[in-house]
């Protein structure tokens, strides 16, 4: 059992978010759905209170905590992708239906959770032994919303 569990806060949409994440991300599955045993400030008796799940291989709970707190870019979940097809699939799923694009591989889902869709190749580019190639890769990335692997590789080549 893990000593840490990711807890994400929602205003009544924990079950819908869990279903979306389970359908979108690898190593993701819904476990138990816990209902409120009594009315409380965030839910009524019998409403979904907590969804237990595995999210990208991590234990997580999605909590219907109410409208008091909002998500911000100060917290994000970074997802490492193997290729452009996986990058495109995840990016498009996250920004669809009310999500939002940001810069440098960052985007938000419709519930306001920030995600970083980061190709493994980006880590390799940032640690490239040639500082000039690193700079070109970084400058190319700074112009992008969704990371374009081929464009960064072209920039690195000069």
Image (cartoon, rainbow, N blue to C red):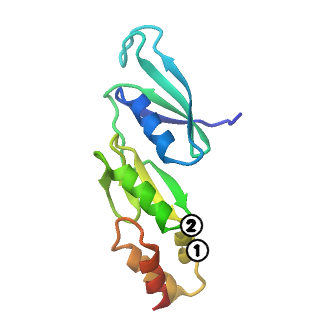
Task: Find residue 66 and report its image quarter.
Answer: top left
Does residue 80 appear to the left or right of 67 in the view shown?
Answer: right
Residue occupying image coordinates x 39% and y 12%? 40
As drawn, the label of residue 124 is 1
What residue is pinned by disc 2? 120
Residue 46 or residue 116, whichever sits in front: 46
Q: Which mark is residue 2?
A: none
Placement of 6 over or under 130, stated as above or below: above
Residue at image point 58% right, 74% down:
124
State the separation of the CA atoms marked 1 and 2. Answer: 7 Å
In the image, residue 21 lies at what x, y percent?
Answer: 47, 41
Percent x, y of residue 46? 42, 11
Residue 114 rendering spot, x and y as whole percentages: 40, 49
From the viewer's perspective, is 12 left or right of 78?
Answer: left
Q: Residue furthest right?
A: 1
Image x and y of residue 55, in percent: 55, 41
Asked if labels 2 and 1 touch by Cβ distance under 8 angstroms, the answer is: yes
Q: Quadrant of residue 59?
A: top right
């Amino acid at each position: 059992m893990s000593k840490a569990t990711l807890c994400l806060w929602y205003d009544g949409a924990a079950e819908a978010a869990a279903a979306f994440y389970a359908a979108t991300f690898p190593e993701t599955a819904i476990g138990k759905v816990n209902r409120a045993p009594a009315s409380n400030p965030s839910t009524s008796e019998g409403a979904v209170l907590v969804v237990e799940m595995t999210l990208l291989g991590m234990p997580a709970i999605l909590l219907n905590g109410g409208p008091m707190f909002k998500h911000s870019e100060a917290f994000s979940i970074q997802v490492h992708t193997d290729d452009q097809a996986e990058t495109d699939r995840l990016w498009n799923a996250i920004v669809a239906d009310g999500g939002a694009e940001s810069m440098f591989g960052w985007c938000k889902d419709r519930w306001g959770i920030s995600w970083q869709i980061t190709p493994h190749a980006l880590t390799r580019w940032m640690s490239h032994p040639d500082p000039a190639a690193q700079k070109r890769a970084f400058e190319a990335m700074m112009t992008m919303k969704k990371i374009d692997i081929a464009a960064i590789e072209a920039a690195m080549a000069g």
